[in-house]
Image: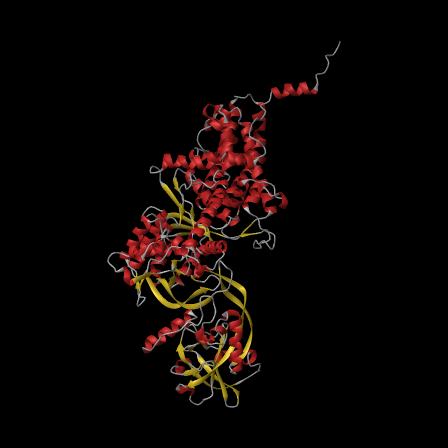
Amino acid sequence: MVKAPAKPASVVGDVVRKTLNLPKTDFPMRANATVREPQLHARTVTELYATQEKERKGVAKTFYLHDGPPFANGSLHTGHFLNRVLKDIINRYKLQRGYYVHYVPGWDCHGLPIEIKALEKLKQPRDKLDPMDIRKHSRELALGAIESQKQDLMRWGILADWSGDKGTRYLTMDPEYEVKQYDVFKQMVKDGLIVQGYKPVYWSPSSGTALAESELEYQDDHVSSSAYVRFPVKHSPVALKAFPNITAVIWTTTPWTIPANRGLCVRSNLEYAIVEVAPGQHDLVALALVDSYAQTVLHQEHVKVVATVWGKDLTGGVFRHPLNGQDSIVLLGDHVTTDAGTGIVHTAPAHGQEDYFAWMAHHAQHHTDNSMTCLVDEKGCYTAEAGADLAGLFVQTHGTEKVLEQLTASNALVSVSNYTHRFPYDWRTKKPILLRATKQWFAKLDSLHALGHEALDNVNMHPKASRRRLEATLSSRSEWCISRQRAWGVPIPVFYEKDTMEPLLNDVTIAHVQKVMLENGGTDAWWSQPVSTLLAPEYDPAQYVKGTDTLDVWFDSGSSWNAVLPKGVQADIYLEGSDQHRGWFQSSLLTSLAVQRKAPYKNVITHGFILDERGQKMSKSLGNVLVPHDIIEGQPKKKIPPYGVDTLRYWVASTDYTSQVGIGPNTMIKISDHVRKVRNTARFLLANLNDFDPRIDSVAYSDMTSLDQYMLHVLHDLQAEITDGYETFAFNKVQQAIAHFIATDLSAFYMEACKDRLYCEAPADPFRRSAQTVLDVALETITKAIAPVVCHTAEDIRLHRLAQFTNAMLNDVPGSVFLEGWFEPKVFDGCKDVTYMFIATNP
């Protein structure tokens, strides 16, 4: 008997393969993101936004996410990516839920950083230039930055109308926007909330302009000269008559303000000690600080306290200025403490806000002259009124040294040392500021405090702890300095009477200026048009001149709710970094309270700042800066592969963004692995659904195996968990839920349990189709769940899935995953019973 020759293994393999339902899909294993994502851009961004505009605007319920405008200056960084993608995740989720999404990207176009760049380009000092030249170059710089940033936002997959030159966007320098901003300002003027005052304000010598509190950054390592200075008595109050040679000792960390001293502030209910420092010589300091004063200043273990007196009994006393001999009167103030120093506060009303209020309160009570003189100019240098020895010296350096020298010469300086403490800096120039009395325009805020807290009670804050910060910021401000001494901004439309310099500012004059500006291309008209054109016809233009101040840029962006949102509409969400509690969140709240008597937002979401993987702030000097472009497109010099935008978007969703957020090479490797697992899972599901058309092949729940019924229940719970994650803005929980399902329920359990059915049963066998029905629901669940985050990947999965059973070319597949609706979890009858039974029989 002759045996037939054995068939080659390859032939046997072919025969076996023909009996199996082998997985098959065109969905690639590798994303090739830098090529594929741009190919999907139109479908996931521009066409998608146009479709929702056409099909849903005015029909579906509208969701308003109001964009906080970034500065139109420089390049976008990873913090911008975090911010914009968080917003985009929310918008895309809402689009999936059937909403019409109202999202208008904006840019904050005015302000100092842009003006400084314009001045650098013009290569001349500001006072030598025509404001129109500065404005022209500033506008060009802003437009250039906007176009560059726009290209980045489009590449990032941010859903918005990017069509044409403008699309739907808002720029705070657009004439229509500026006129809407004036509507807010006009109402505040009409209600008496806008006033002019001569008082100390935060002043930046490096910027040459006043600043608001929101424009300050505090540095903890600032070093000042700490000085203890004696002021000899001139006219003793009754309580000090027995001590004719007594000196009041003050402590200051701003010795440069000593020339402007007008008083010594004490606390009425604080006990003061008369300390003998030498025979017949006595110092006056707070009793609670005697030991500290003796040991750290006088370098004595003990000093003799010969008497005590209450602060209230020092009123009426006058001390002599140690440099110029002028009167330094005793004032009362609740800001005086015994935390440090001597309990006696040197008071220069032109250079301190608490000093100013104590000075004004004293003179209001006694009906005396409250005039004061600022001895410091806009450059931070002493004026001629400070004296020949000081004139022209920068107060925080050489000026301080000279004052200390003068105090030493007059035997008034007790001690001096370096003092490291927290100090305010200009947030743009990163240089120290000072307080300086100037004429400025202010928004009065006291009347808005109670209304603001009431309004915030109706605002949801995420995280909840951020509420305290916004409320504290609101409570701490009694006024807002809204005037700036710059050319690139929205002008304060005030006129001044030539002879008296009395301001003319009312709703009539503002309305006329608005009309002129609309007719003449915007706020440039303030500089290009004469007073006769700008001033309302009710007034004689020959009697007035135009003001030169511009509005604080926070007033610009803080009025955006009026310029961008429909009248009376509260935004569903404001979402920005935690620094915006004292910035845009606050300025928007204040302007809205003043005009609408309500908050401009329903929900405020706050995110943290970007750090490197070691928790350090990113800086070029440390070499730890990662910019989105390098991560997305790759940077060979830094050994960064091209991850694509979806991987970086996935990183955003994986973080607890409510606190500080870390990123680095190792982080991106881990995130890339997560994205790859999701992609490979989708590919596996697609491959096993290549012959499954859900329209005709789906198996009814009642005809399924208990295993398949159980998996549908697992998917039901997963869908509910994902929905809750998006609804509560906990996107990292969404990612965790998907990852757990893929790794545990799907890969390790279900796919192992049903692979024989998938591969070995007849293609149309109901047993196999039942498993495919579950896989189809799983793929739909995963695709829709990841869509708000990895929008390109989700759309690509959908295209390949629909192409499988419609035989369409990928590019011909209609629609979008974002317009198909959200999954609606179905609870099937007996589903929980099946689950309990399945678990009981499969321990």
Of 312 and 562, the residue lying toward us: 562
Q: Position of residue 817 (x, y in %)?
A: 46, 34
Who's the residue at 47% across and 56% down the image? 119
**Residue found at x 43% / y 87%:** 240
On screen, residue 718 above or below 531:
above
- Screen quadrant of the N terminus: top right
Q: Is residue 421 left or right of residue 9?
A: left
Query: Which is more toward the observer, 84 or 699?
Result: 84
Could you tell me if residue 312 is visible in this image?
yes
- Choose between 21 and 223: the one closer to the eye: 223
Q: Farthest residue toward the right?
A: 1
Colouring style: secondary structure
- Determine the residue located farthest toward the top in the rendered image: 1
Percent coordinates x, y for residue 408 in the rendering: 53, 80
Q: How many discs mark residues in the rendered view?
A: 0
Q: Is residue 274 left or right of residue 743?
A: left
Which of 547 and 651 lies nearest the eye of the viewer?
A: 547
Image coordinates for residue 801, horizontal then vertical, percent: 50, 29
Up-down relation of residue 834 to residue 425 (above or below): above
> Residue 104 at what x, y percent from top left?
40, 44
- In terms of image quadrants, where is residue 301? bottom right
Is 36 placed left or right of 361 in the picture?
Answer: right
